[in-house]
Image (cartoon, helix red, strand yellow):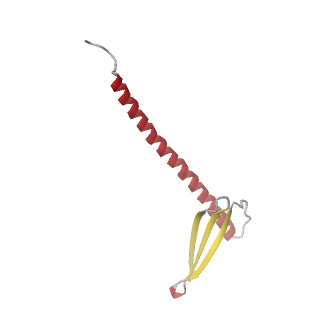
Amino acid sequence: MNEKGFTLLEVLVAVVILAVSLSVLLDIQTNYIRRVDTDFQRLEALDFFKRDFYGLKKEDERFSIKTEKETLPYGIKQEKNIIIDKKTGKKVLEITTYEK
């Protein structure tokens, strides 16, 4: 017999391969979007910190800053500024500065 076309098994294998490929691509795209959102939030927090540090007008009160000061050996002063999202209460960014 010289029949043209695909068997049911060949079609099912092709559909499974397509489904697996699409699910992997969807997972990659979802992670990318989540990472971009996190990076954008960190940039906003950094802008908030810079405005607070230089005494400029803060346009967005979405964040709060928690400051922890510590004196390290040899008289080095360490200051940790933790920027927290007021909505979620989670730490968005941590900036550490050192001074002699």
In the rendered image, residue 31, in percent from the top left (x then y), is placed at: 50, 49
Side (left or right) of 83 relative to 55: left
Q: Residue furthest top?
A: 1
In the rendered image, residue 44, in percent from the top left (x then y), is placed at: 63, 59
Q: Residue furthest bottom?
A: 74
- Quadrant of residue 65 in the image? bottom right
In the rendered image, residue 63, in percent from the top left (x then y), is placed at: 67, 63
- Quadrant of residue 16 in the image? top left
Q: Nearer the viewer, residue 47 or 68?
A: 68
Residue at the image position 73 percent from the left and 60 percent from the top: 59
Q: Is residue 26 above or below residue 50?
A: above
In the rendered image, residue 36, in percent from the top left (x then y), is placed at: 55, 51
Residue at the image position 58 percent from the left and 69 percent from the top: 95
Task: Give the number of callouts.
Answer: 0
- Quadrant of residue 21 in the image? top left
Q: Is residue 10 above or below residue 61?
A: above
Residue at the image position 34 percent from the left and 17 percent from the top: 5
Q: Is residue 84 above or below residue 34?
A: below
Assign the C terminus to one quadrant of the image: bottom right
Q: Nearer the viewer, residue 56 or 78?
A: 78
Residue at the image position 45 percent from the left and 39 percent from the top: 23
Side (left or right) of 74 relative to 11: right
Q: Is residue 45 above or below residue 4?
A: below
Assign the N terminus to one quadrant of the image: top left
Q: Nearer the viewer, residue 38 or 87?
A: 87
